[in-house]
Structures are given as structure tokens and as C-alpha cells.
Image: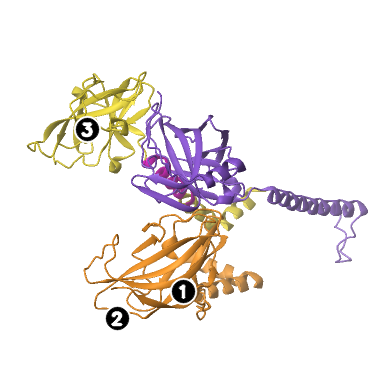
Chain colours: A purple, B yellow, C orange
Amino acid sequence: MTAPPPVHRHKAPRRDVQTAVADLGKRLGVTGLVLAAVAIGGVIKAHELDVEQRERPFIHAGAIGQIRSARTFDVTVLGVRGSTKLKAGDDVYDTDGVWVLVKVRLMANRDPSFVGYAAVRDTAGRTYRASRRMDQPLDSRELQPGLPVEGEVAFEVPRTAVAGLAVRFSSGSYDLRMDAMPEISLGIDRVAAARWLAAPDALTLADAEAGPT
Amino acid sequence: MTSTQSRGWWRHNRWGLIAVVPSLVVAIGFTYSTAYNAYWKHHPREPVAAGEGGWVSYGGARIRLLGLAPAYNVKDYGGKPFGPPGTARIWRATLAFEVSDKDTLAGCDLLLEDTDGRTYSAGPSELRGARVPYPSCTQDSLATPSPRYEVAVYFVLPGTAKGAAVRVQLDTKLPHYARLTAAG
Amino acid sequence: MGWWRGLALRVVDAPLRYQIIGIAGALVAASGLVGGLDGVSPPPKEPTIEVGTALPAGPWTVTVTGARLLGDSPPLKLEHPGDHWVVVLATVEITADKSHNDIADIIRLREGTLAGTRPDHIYLVRDTKPVQYLHPGLPERVAFIWELAAGATVPTALEVLVYGETWRIDSLTDRFEWLDLEPHARLTVPVEDKRT
């Protein structure tokens, strides 16, 4: 049995070139992985939708005469008219803007349902909720499945906003996030808008009545 | 990793590991209760079906569906026949109640379920002008108070729909609702 | 109490960096208990404006135009006969991109028994009907109305605060919302006594 060689030096032995290269490679690899993770995170962050976009309503775009779903009920816009004076009940309501009356057919899908939100949206993206200056016949109307209801909804909008309006509906009143929302273009051009401004007579807001079954 | 090292790791991180359990309970429990309250608890999800003799025990009362059929003899307040819009049909449900207190079922909702599972409210706007009682689960206030009474409820369904069951629900008892089937 | 000793030893043995972070955290937490994290309320910063000045105040632009003292004035119904109506008149235009129904938040009185209280009524001057919504780009004359008890001092001028909001991200929902309802201006409005 031979004795182990005596220790002469306390310094670590010099690494050979192979180990040094392997070490460097390992470090570069880790650095590369970290950089890649940061870069991927950056790309995701840059392309991520913000809350407003992520939770936006599901818009079902359509035109007059087309049925569009608001999840708990369906909407068909039947027509639109306008004036600067509106008669509802016994009162006549004037405005510095224009009254836009949207005639709709509404029908619940599976369960009784109410219209929680009705608004018109102009080409600049501003939204005007249905007027509360008078009682609106469709506001408190409970819709039943398979039994269509027709009536008008009145909106008060600035004169410059009339052309290009679209109407939106939802079953929710305040929380409109991530819910189906019909957006129906009303097809109002500048000529029609100008005609409504010049119309002298008050329009009478149509009551809610049963539609054709 | 050797088994000694492994034991060391568990020991080293034991407080963190113990803390994971209550953290998970709080995190998942909170989300679950929010989801439960938002999507389940406040909606009629769990029907209570009839037991012996067609009686359903619900909200401290016993309820039985005595009859469910189209009603053709509804009148308006002038005594003339009242017709529903278009091809729609009026349906009439008769319910028997047994209650311990007259207000046991006050504020209930009454719905008619058709064979496709669609539901309709009692006394809808389509019956405006018809001489039908206001839909209620409580006894007519003019009648002699009794723990047993009957109530007639009216619905309007599309002409092609067929009534299958009457639902009685109390907001305070959701997600449970009484589901009373015809000819039970 | 072995675990306690173990914990103490680990804290003592921890690198200096962690010890400093720990101490700093404990100090912040402790100062929070005595209000160290609360903001310091600054002196009233809202400027004083004149009657008739249009004030952009977040979702709305408000022009206070006058104040009135009224007796019984249908369709308003006094809760106690003999009381008076105190009315602040203002033109309100929604400058936000959506209809607003928080119109009652806009005007408050600064002094007297009605200071800081919500108006009892808000009416559209145009048709003397209650206001629920005002819509973008449609300025309206609005009457903010309070019932003043019969025995209260009748003011000859009202100290009025005009409130506004800021469009910012709500830390709770991560969405942009109109928040931080606070006074954006104050003004003194002479009261026209129209009780006769």
C-alpha cells in the first residue's frame, strides 16, 4: 500500500481549457434564456389587450330589418324618424338637439327579459342613453319568449351627431362588459338629419304593442 | 438530490409549505364563493320536485298544481271576451297552497315552463285589459283567512308552445325553486 | 420553543441585506398603524370663480348662473309647510363621451344647515321635470334645489362648491373611470329672494 502523495499547494488546480469553455457556455446559455424570457414577456405585454378591450361587449352589427341578438332577447330595428319636438303622454318636449325615435321589435329568447340599456352611438364614439325626460313605453316592458313587442325608443342627441347614428341594446343596465350587444346602423344621412331639424310638428312617441306572432 | 438533501429541503421550507395550504384555501375559496354567488346562488338552478300526492314542500309551504291548460273564457273588464295578441294563447294554472303563515310565500315569482324549457311570467303585459287576478302565491286579501287556499294564475304563450310545469320561486330560497308538473 | 429559537437564529444569521429589508418593512408597517401611510390633506386648493364663469370639471362643464329663494312652488312639494326652497341655477354640459346620471353630485353648498348635503331635487329648467340623465354635447339649465327649514337664517348669498371628477385608471378594476369627486371651484352667488 502506498501513501497518498503529500499536498504541496493549496491553490485549486488550474482549470483546463475544456472546462472553462463548458462553464462559459453554461453561463451564456443561462443569460440567453433570461434574455429570451424578458423579450417574450415584453412582446406579450406590448400586444396584450387592455381591460377596456378585453372586457368589451360582443358587438353584433346589423342594419335596419335584420334580427340581432342581445343574448336574452332579440332586436330588429324597423325604422327611424326624427324631429325637434316630441309628444309623449300629454306633454310636448322640446330640445336644443334632435329627437331620434327608433322603432324596434323585441322578443325574449328563453326566459322573460327586460331591456336594460338602449343607447345611440355617433360617429365620434359618443353614446347617448335613451331619454328619461318622459316614461318610455319599452323601458319597463317585460318581454316574453316567442311574443314580439314593437314600440319606439326616444333619444335626444346634438344636431351635429344625428347623421351616422347606430343604436345599441343590452340586457344589463350598468355592467355591459362581455355581454352580447346588437349595434344596428340607423342609416341616417345628412339630408334626413336636415329634414328632421326643419320639421315643425311634434312626433308622438309610439306606445308598446304586440308584434306579429 | 440524495434523500438526505431532500429531507433538508422539506425541513428548510416547512413554514412556507405549511402557509401554502391556507393561502390556497383563501384564494380558491374566495373565487369559488364569488362565482357561486354570481352565477348560481341567485338564479333558479335547483328544482324541488313533487313528492307523494303531487305536493312540493318549498319555502315553508306545501304547493300542488291542480290544473294547467289553455284558457278560452277570459273576459275584459267590460265582460267581453279577451283575446291575446295574434296566435298566442292564454294558459291558466290552478295551484293549491298549504301554509303556516299567510305571508309564507309573499313576494314569490310564478313562471310557466313550456315543453322546450322556455319560461313565461305570470300576468304579463300581454294580459293588460283582461279581467284576471294579480299573480300571487298568497290568499286573496278579501277571502276568509285559511291555511289552505287555491290560486289561479294566467300566462300568455306563443300558439305553438305547450305548458309543461309551473315554477314557484322565492328570492330568499334561490337557487332552489318549486317545479310543479301537470298531471303529477 | 425550539422552533422559535430556530427562527431567531435564522434571522440573526440572515444576510445583512435581508435584515435591512426586514427592518424597513417592519418600520413601514408600524408607521401605517399610526397613519404614517395616510396622505396629508392639503389646504383647499379649488380656485374661486365668478358667477357666469364656465368651469370645465372633468366629465362636465358647469356655469353657475344664479341663486333663488322660493316659497311654495309647484310642482315642487315642501315637506314642511312654511319652509323655503333654495335654488342654485347652473348650465351643465356633459363633455364626457357618455350620458351621465350623477348630476346631483355637481353642486354643494359650503355653509349653513344645508352645507355638504345632496340637493333634495334636481330639475331641468326647460320643462320643470326631474333630471336623470344629461347627454354629451347638449348643455342644459339645471336647478339644484334644497328645502330650507322655516326657522333657518335666510341667506342673501350662497357659498357654492362646484364638484368635478378625474378620468383615471381605477386601481380596483384597471379600467379608466371618472373618479375622485372633489370641489373644482368655489364661488359666492347672490340670492334673489322670489318668495312673494
**Mark 1 or 2, which is nearer the eye?**
2
- Amino acid type of the residue that numbered disc 1 sits on in the rendered structure: Leu
- Residue C175, quarter of the rendered image: bottom right
Q: Chain of mark 1?
A: C
Amino acid at pointer 2: Thr
Q: Give me the C-alpha separation between circle 3 and circle 2.
A: 62 Å
The answer to whether dots 3 and 2 both sit on one chain is no
Quadrant in the picture for the C terminus of chain B: top left
Magenta span has B41?
yes
Q: Give the Cα separation between the discs numbered 1 and 3.
A: 53 Å
Tell me the SS state at disc 2: loop
Percent x, y of residue C171? 54, 60
For label 2, the residue is C153
Going by the numbered disc 3, the residue's amino acid type is Ser
Same chain for marks 1 and 3? no
User: Label for residue C33?
Assistant: 1
Identify the element where label 1 is drawn: helix
Write the residue at 45% across / 63% down.
C141
Which subunit holds the residue at mark 3? Answer: B
Q: Residue at x 24, y 78 (%)?
A: C151
Whether residue B96 is situated above or below residue C138 in the rendered picture:
above
User: Which region shows up in magenta?
Assistant: B27-42
Marks 1, 3: nearer the viewer: 3
Instruction: Say which of A115 and B77 sits in front.
Output: B77
Q: Earlier in the sequence, mark 1 or mark 2?
A: 1
Most distant residue in the front direction: A200
B147 relative to B90 in the view: left or right:
left
Give the residue at mark 3: B57
| Circle 1/circle 2 CB separation < 8 Å | no
